[in-house]
Image (cartoon, rainbow, N blue to C red):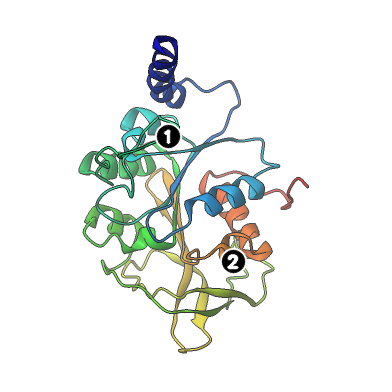
Amino acid sequence: MKAGLASLAATAASIPEAFTAPKAPGETKVIYFGGDYIHNGVGQERYLRQTFSKSGWRMLFAQASRFITPEVLADTDLFMLNRIGDTDSQGFSTLGLVEERPEPDPFLTPEMENAIIDNVRNRGMGFIALHCTAGNSTKLGLMTLLGIKPARGGAPLQPVRCHDFDQRHQITRGFGDFVIDPDENLIKEIVDGNVTRLFTSTGENDGSTCPGGWCAERGKGRMVVLMAGHTNEAWSHSKYREIHWRAAHWAMKRDIPPFGMKS
């Protein structure tokens, strides 16, 4: 039993070290933090691993807010965020069987928010805000980074049509209309005139129309916002996956190779 407890303690101690380990020469470090009480983190991780399966990047998936530290972000090439709320949904535990969960970590502390913004603006880290991230209305620094008016609120599930793609931009050039069925058509108001609107989304049941994606240069870095993603249908959609692929390369100022996945 002592050996088992020692093994668990060693595992727990090694997790932060693994996240902060120096990158290998030529390595691309991508961190994804998603999944909360109403958004399927299991599906998100599965589909993102498939989407970027041919990238050759080191994909890291955060298990709790405590691991998104300034030290972890300091050499991250791309940070992808899809979270909302004030705390993690569950308290983090390294145990295989959990009878009672520990207290959950606070989500997006001022230190975390400032570290994200600093790494984008002053170091050049790429940042992709997905779906509900744009609903963290009390995080004013993050909302300024995204270029939107702070606002929360959900939307009904319905077929969502993506259309009016910017044919001049690398992320959306060549795209035609497609439908994600079902998803949320979250309405956000862009208040920054320096952003580039990539495409529009329309709820086919309620007729709501809003920006579906946009991007901007932010100091030394780049950020992209993509609003679909409430359901697995968005994460597994072939066209939307290609947008994820292109957005990730663009945010890191990389050439964008043709999209493809390992079988």
Residue at 29% in and 54% down: 142
Amino acid type at mark 2? Glu
* Category of crowding for the residue at label 1, using alpha-carbon neighbours closer than 10 angstroms: few (below 14), some (14–19), many (at least 20): few
SS for callout 2: helix
Q: Which mark is on residue 129? A: none
* Mark 2–mark 1 distance (CA, rounded to whole Å): 31 Å
Relative to 222, is 240 above or below? Answer: below
Give how far across and how far down residue 228 sits, in percent. 50, 67
Q: Position of residue 131 (x, y in %)?
A: 44, 62
Q: Name the spot of residue 16 as percent of width and height, x first.
A: 39, 24
Query: For residue 6, which quarter of the picture?
Result: top left
Image coords of residue 87 (percent x, y): 26, 49
Q: Quadrant of residue 110?
A: top left
The residue singled out by tag 1 in the image is 97
Mark 2, residue position: 233
Q: Earlier in the sequence, mark 2 or mark 1?
A: 1
Residue drawn where x is 57% and y is 65% of the image: 234
In the image, residue 10 above or below residue 132: above
Residue kind at label 1, given as amino acid type: Leu
169, 2: nearer the viewer: 2
Query: Mark 2, residues whose alpha carbon is within 10 Å: few (<14), some, or many (≥20)?
Result: some
Tally of marks:
2
Which residue is drawn at the image coordinates 55% and 45% (left, top)? 253
Please state if 47 lies on the left or on the right of 33 as rendered. right
Can you say whether 249 is above or below 187 in the image? above
Q: Secondary structure at mark 1?
A: loop
Tag in front: 2 or 1: 1
